[in-house]
Amino acid sequence: MTDKRLLVFSTLARTLSFGETARLLGISQPAVSKHVAALEAEIGAALFVRYGRSVALTDKGRALLQIASGILEGYAAIDSIKE
């Protein structure tokens, strides 16, 4: 169980690279961009500042990362009890 957008977001927050995030998750770079754009639209704020090929978290991004980490840990806990 997972939320793909939160997984993409948290991976990008860790790697700070669209290319590395795409490689780690086995998706395309445009897919990474689309997931992040959809999440930013839903939140109503930029989560990353883009610097050419690299990114940095905004204040809203850092706040969401804390929340997303807990949610993803919850999903992992659910997966651990599945039969």
Image (spheres, rainbow, N blue to C red):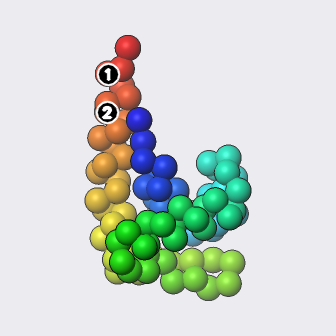
Quarter of the image where the N terminus is located: top left
Q: Is 80 positioned to the left or the right of 12 in the image?
A: left
Q: Of 7 and 15, which appears nearest the observer?
A: 7
Is residue 14 in sight in this rendering? no
Q: Residues within 10 Å of mark 1 (few under 14, many from 20)?
A: few
Calculate the distance from the C-alpha at mark 2 to the C-alpha at mark 1: 7 Å
Residue 31 locus on image (x, y percent) = 64, 59
Is residue 36 in sight in this rendering? yes
What's the amino acid at mark 2? Ala
Does 68 sit above or below residue 79?
below
Does 27 sit above or below residue 82?
below
Q: Of 3 and 61, which appears nearest the observer?
A: 3
Residue 19 locus on image (x, y percent) = 70, 63
Residue 82 locus on image (x, y percent) = 36, 20
Residue 7 locus on image (x, y percent) = 47, 52
Quarter of the image where the C terminus is located: top left
Image quadrant assignment for residue 22 = bottom right
Contact? badges 2 and 1 (CB < 8 Å): yes
The residue located at (52%, 56%) in the rendering is 8
Query: Can you identify the residue that label 1 sits on?
Result: 81
The residue located at (32%, 30%) in the rendering is 78
**Dot 1: element:** helix
**Dot 2: element:** helix
Query: Can you identify the residue that label 2 sits on?
Result: 77
Work out which residue is located at the far top of the displayed protein and give it: 83
The residue located at (67%, 51%) in the rendering is 27
